[in-house]
Image: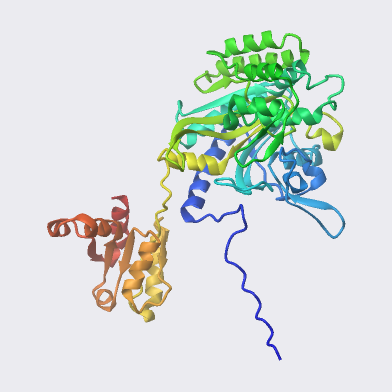
């Protein structure tokens, strides 16, 4: 009789498009988010946490990746027949909150939130299906002064975390300007927006990829279509070649000053009332920002900004880092976008039937952390705890007491809880933990009322490069009285 097969062991690997975050990454993210939160709080915004799961109906279908299952969201049907999904951004859940608690919230309502979101996208290098966002939004403010405030606050946040002026630019456009451009090339009929909606979607997604495909590639997508390097073909929007050239030329019309860019747009869109309305709003935003000291060295009007999500109705903006990094092939390239947002006046209306103005911004947390590492602002290695080694199992209470005393003094500390027989393994553990200091006290030291304190950082440097004389001048291990333990550790950590 054949034996039953043993159950197959699960593979120890993350699903495709997902990743794990370890010590330094988690700590650096928490510290960066705390800094950004202080900027948001200084502007009067309050924190909000929403559920990671929403109904598909509440989330809506606004992602540009229409070819993916469930249009790019992770969704499933529960026992009651309702379709649920992991949130794909922080804005759609806010719209639900604003509608559900509209009688309790102040108007306008300012909130910020931070956490993971999930998108069922095709993963690639540096492109994950779960990533962190950090959002700030104002609901209930119809004036573009709210948009201007968000743009200025975004600039403040970037500088607060360590991106200096000159290394970033916040670029601002308006969906009404884009509507005007679409109207001028025949992709939008103001009397019936449903006409050519599919072709218009193709054009908007193409424009949003200007930085990847360049003007020539975008013009292909605007006309007959484009074949990529793999041979995959993407249908075009069906414009004539001259229409596509006019469209891309208008989008690239960022001139030497905000005033000149706005004047150029006003001339190009003179026949579109919708487009001129957007130009007027851009002019007011530029004026409001200038009055607060946010000049074109920090925030500029740029007609090429599109934003891929489908719910934007007015001003849209992106924060782009302008410094150069080396890609995986050693080539220089600019870092690119780390944040974006805009006005979405119709999102809450889906729930209430009444127009509720709203605007906000979302920072891509993982990309911003990568940028800070590229700038050397954060190191990617967290300093571990002081390790109290165990020389005598029967004296575990003493060792735990040492660690408690260090923690009361504000020093991160732990006791080694592995097998204490091999002291070398304890020091190897401390090295793996990136510990700066180890505390050693055997029976002899305890009898004499002293401890040995080993500077692991200095010891590693000396072992790697120093001469015997330097060992004598700067010993990596010292003996001090038990009473002086905390003060000595503080001095070593300070050094």
Vertical placement of 159 versus 16: above or below? above
Q: In this view, does 336 lie to the left or right of 275?
A: left
> Nearest the camera: 439 or 335?
335
> Nearest the camera: 6 or 474?
6
Q: How many labels does the image show?
A: 0
Question: Can residue 20 be seen?
Answer: yes
Seen at 67% across and 48% down, the residue is 118
Question: Can residue 389 be seen?
Answer: no
Vertical placement of 377 versus 298: above or below? below
Vertical placement of 273 versus 306: above or below? above
> Nearest the camera: 464 or 389?
464
Image coordinates for residue 305, horizontal then vertical, percent: 63, 26
Image coordinates for residue 55, horizontal then vertical, percent: 80, 48
Q: Hey, which residue is sitting farthest left in the picture?
A: 469
Which image quadrant: the N terminus? bottom right
Q: Quadrant of residue 205?
A: top right
Image coordinates for residue 132, horizontal then vertical, percent: 60, 46
Q: Hey, which residue is sitting farthest bottom in the picture?
A: 1
Q: Is residue 224 left or right of residue 99?
A: left
Seen at 75% across and 15% down, the residue is 184
Q: Is residue 448 left or right of residue 202?
A: left
Seen at 74% across and 22% down, the residue is 239
Q: Quadrant of residue 264?
A: top right
Image coordinates for residue 91, horizontal then vertical, percent: 70, 38
Q: Quadrant of residue 193?
A: top right
Seen at 76% across and 9% down, the residue is 271
> Nearest the camera: 197 or 427?
197
Colour setup of the view: rainbow
């Amino acid at each position: 009789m054949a034996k039953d097969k043993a159950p197959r062991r699960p593979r120890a690997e993350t699903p495709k498009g997902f990743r794990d975050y370890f010590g330094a990454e988690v700590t650096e993210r928490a510290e960066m988010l705390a800094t950004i939160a202080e900027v948001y709080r200084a502007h009067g915004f309050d924190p909000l946490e929403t559920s990671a799961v929403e109904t598909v109906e509440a989330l809506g279908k606004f992602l540009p990746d229409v070819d993916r299952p469930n249009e790019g969201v992770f969704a499933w049907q529960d026992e009651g027949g309702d379709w649920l999904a992991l949130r794909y951004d922080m804005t759609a859940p806010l719209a639900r909150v604003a509608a559900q608690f509209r009688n309790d919230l102040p108007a306008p309502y300012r909130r910020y939130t931070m956490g993971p979101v999930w998108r069922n996208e095709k993963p690639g290098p540096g492109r994950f299906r779960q990533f962190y966002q950090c959002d700030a939004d104002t609901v209930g403010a119809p004036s573009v002064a709210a948009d201007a405030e968000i743009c200025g606050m975004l600039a403040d946040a970037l500088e607060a975390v360590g991106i200096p002026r000159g290394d970033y630019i916040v670029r601002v456009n308006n969906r009404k300007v884009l509507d005007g451009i679409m109207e001028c090339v025949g992709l939008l009929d103001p009397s019936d927006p449903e006409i050519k909606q599919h072709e218009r979607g193709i054009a908007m997604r193409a424009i949003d990829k200007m930085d990847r495909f360049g003007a020539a590639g975008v013009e292909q997508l605007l006309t007959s279509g484009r074949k990529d390097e793999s041979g995959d073909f993407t249908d075009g929007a069906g414009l004539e070649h001259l229409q596509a050239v006019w469209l891309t030329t208008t989008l690239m019309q960022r001139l030497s000053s905000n005033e000149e860019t706005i004047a150029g747009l006003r001339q190009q869109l003179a026949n579109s009332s919708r487009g001129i309305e957007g130009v007027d709003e851009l002019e007011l935003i530029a004026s409001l920002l200038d009055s607060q000291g946010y000049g074109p060295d920090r925030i500029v009007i740029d007609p090429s900004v599109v934003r891929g999500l489908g719910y934007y109705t007015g001003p849209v903006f992106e924060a782009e880092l302008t410094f150069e990094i080396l890609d995986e092939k050693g080539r220089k390239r600019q870092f690119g976008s780390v944040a974006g947002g805009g006005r979405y006046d119709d999102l809450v209306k889906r729930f209430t039937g009444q127009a509720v103005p709203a605007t906000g911004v979302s920072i891509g947390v993982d990309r911003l952390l990568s940028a800070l590492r590229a700038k050397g602002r954060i190191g990617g290695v967290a300093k571990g705890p002081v390790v109290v080694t165990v020389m005598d199992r029967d004296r575990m209470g003493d060792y735990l007491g040492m660690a408690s005393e260090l923690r009361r003094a504000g020093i991160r500390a732990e006791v080694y809880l592995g097998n204490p027989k091999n002291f070398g393994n304890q020091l190897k553990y401390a090295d793996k933990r990136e510990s700066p200091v180890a505390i050693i006290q055997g029976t002899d030291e305890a009898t004499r009322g002293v401890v040995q304190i080993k500077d692991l950082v200095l010891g590693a440097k000396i072992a790697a490069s120093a001469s015997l004389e330097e060992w004598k001048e700067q010993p990596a291990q010292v003996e001090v009285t038990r009473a002086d333990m905390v003060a000595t550790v503080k001095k070593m950590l300070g050094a």
